[in-house]
Image (cartoon, grey):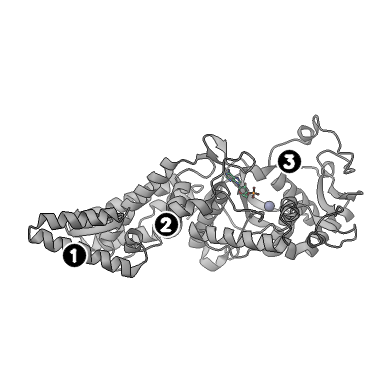
């Protein structure tokens, strides 16, 4: 029952103890919604969804509150609005909806709360005011800044010393910063910026900095101290470091008790990123691959390690899932059994070790096959329950074997069933020419017939 998580602050795995087991809180930095997200952006979505599933299993479905925000005001969104002439809300609503659909396609459960930054401007202003009152923030002609040297233990998450950040840097004179490490809490509006990107404040009309958005939303929805804060490793510095600085200096308590970071998704050894131009959009990938195959591929690496995204990885994932669904089909008609295997759960409890969890899932498929070979009804019922319970934890096996192999179009499936029947009849009558003709016809439609001990089944390839 013990969960161990690698905490980026402690730099080691720690036993996870929530503050309140009846209200376990998880915050993950969400997307900036101004374009379609690439598959690298979905690594944290899938990784932390798997954590969400593990926590729900452990503490109860209603005991876990998972917030993943939408950053709907930010420099890149303003740039997109200026470029296209579209209203900011049109841009953000469009891309937030695509993101939510894509996340659902890879079986990510909807988070408990999806706070939008622009609904929390008041809360952000209130934190900035507190920081100013406590002497951590100061106003200039361009905005309000957090004064990093005021915070005693700044940098404990990333391990960067203040001097590292200052080395070689020069104070940005235009912004009026006191220290190069200082960062914006509030940015005063510049001439020509769209009206819908401007809010009033005592410092003048403007908009919040990116970091303060998360500090405000996490505190409002989850509390001043949350259990787990997650995101990609690139967010560790400066984003998360600055979230810590703002929240802890304003609230006087620890922001998050465990910090978790996923490694990069790479393409040919380089981080997938828009600026490098080596991106694959999930939206495009979903045209050729089932979302569950993409999720399986993503979970095949440990979340902290870099993962190289290749066609081979997807092919592997697909063939392994086909095998597992094939095993599930063989025990599908068994009675309802009770899941008792703990292999997948144990792997996830050890800092989300998904490569081992997937190996355990394959082992369960092997057990299903062997139970079916022996025609052991009790073992078949158990294997079915074990596979489904493990699938639930991993966000896999969400389809029936028939849906997986045949797709959801029932008229079309009935037509193929009839052809397979006709082929069976031809074989029984030793009409090999007709049997081959039907097989070839189906093959040309992308349907493969699999002859087995218990008769012929089929699947789309
Ligand atoms: P962004 O929209 O760039 O703020 O990214 C959204 C989330 O995706 C953040 O948690 C990033 O850390 C994460 N992310 C971006 N690129 C990658 C990548 N290549 N691999 C893994 N995570 C990434
Ligand atoms: Zn954040």
Q: Whole-Å distance between the Cαs marked 2 and 1?
A: 31 Å
Q: Give the structural element (helix, strand or loop) at label 3.
A: loop
Mark on residue 155?
3
* Residue 25 occupies quadrant: bottom right
Q: In the figure, residue 460 lies in which quadrant?
A: bottom left
Marked residue nearer the N-terminal end (1 or 3): 3
Q: Horizontally, is 296 left or right of 4 in the view?
A: left
Q: Does mark 3 have its CB less than 8 Å from ligand 2?
A: no
Looking at the image, tell me whether mark 2 or mark 1 is earlier in sequence order: 2
Q: Nearer the viewer, residue 195 or 136?
A: 195
The residue that mark 1 highlights is 421
Residue 450 visible to an observer of this rendering: no
Q: Quick check: 232 left or right of 307?
A: right
Residue 402 shows up from this direction: yes
Q: Give neighbour class at mark 1: few <14, some 14-19, many 20+ (Cα, 10 Å).
A: some
The residues bearing labels 1 and 3 have C-alpha atoms spaced at a distance of 68 Å
Rendered residue at 17%/59% (across/down): 454
Q: Position of residue 319 (x, y in %)?
A: 34, 48
Sequence-wise, the earlier of marks 2 and 3 is: 3
x%, y% of residue 182?
82, 43
For marks 2 and 3, give the CA distance. Answer: 38 Å
Q: Secondary structure at mark 1?
A: helix
In this view, the residue in front, 246 or 350, is 246
Residue bearing the label numbered 2: 396
Above or below, comparing residue 201 to residue 211 in the picture = below
């Amino acid at each position: 029952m013990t969960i161990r998580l690698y905490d980026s602050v402690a730099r080691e795995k720690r036993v996870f103890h929530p503050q309140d087991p009846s209200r376990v809180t998880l915050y993950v930095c969400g997307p900036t919604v101004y374009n379609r997200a690439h598959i690298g952006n979905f690594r944290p979505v899938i990784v932390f969804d798997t954590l969400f599933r593990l926590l729900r299993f452990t503490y109860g479905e209603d005991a876990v509150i998972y917030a993943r925000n939408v950053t709907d005001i930010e420099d890149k969104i303003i740039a997109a609005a200026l470029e296209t002439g579209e209203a900011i809300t049109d841009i953000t609503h469009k891309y937030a909806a695509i993101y939510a659909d894509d996340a659902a396609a890879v079986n990510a459960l909807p988070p408990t709360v999806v706070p939008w930054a622009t609904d929390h401007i008041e809360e952000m202003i209130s934190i900035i005011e507190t920081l100013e009152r406590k002497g951590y923030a100061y106003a200039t002609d361009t905005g309000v800044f957090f004064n990093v040297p005021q915070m005693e233990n700044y940098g404990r998450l990333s391990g960067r010393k203040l001097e590292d950040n200052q080395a070689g840097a020069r104070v940005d004179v235009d912004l009026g910063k006191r220290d190069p490490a200082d960062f914006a809490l509030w940015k005063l509006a510049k001439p020509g910026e769209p009206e819908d990107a401007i809010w009033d404040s005592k410092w003048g009309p403007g908009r919040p900095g990116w970091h303060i958005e998360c500090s405000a939303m996490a505190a409002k929805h989850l509390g001043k101290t949350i259990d787990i804060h997650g995101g990609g490793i690139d967010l560790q510095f400066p984003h998360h470091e600055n979230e810590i600085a703002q929240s802890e200096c304003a609230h006087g308590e620890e922001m998050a008790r465990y910090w978790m970071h996923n490694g990069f998704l790479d393409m040919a050894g380089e981080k997938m990123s828009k600026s490098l131009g080596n991106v694959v959009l999930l939206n495009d990938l979903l045209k050729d691959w089932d979302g569950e195959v993409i999720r399986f591929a993503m979970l095949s690496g440990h979340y902290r390690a870099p993962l190289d995204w290749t066609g081979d990885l997807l092919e592997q994932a697909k063939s392994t899932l086909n095998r597992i669904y094939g095993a599930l089909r063989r025990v599908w008609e068994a009675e309802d059994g009770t899941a008792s295997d703990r292999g997948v759960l144990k792997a996830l409890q050890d800092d989300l070790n998904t490569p081992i969890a997937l190996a355990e899932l394959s082992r369960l498929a092997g057990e299903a096959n062997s139970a079916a070979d022996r025609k052991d009804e009790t073992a078949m019922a158990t294997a079915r329950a074990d596979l489904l319970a493990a699938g639930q934890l991993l966000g896999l096996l969400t389809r029936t074997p028939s849906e997986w192999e045949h797709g959801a179009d029932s008229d079309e499936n009935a037509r193929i069933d009839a052809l397979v029947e006709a082929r069976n009849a031809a074989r029984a009558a030793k009409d090999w020419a007709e049997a081959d003709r039907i097989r070839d016809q189906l093959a040309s439609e992308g349907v493969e017939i699999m002859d087995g001990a218990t008769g012929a089944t089929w699947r789309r390839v």
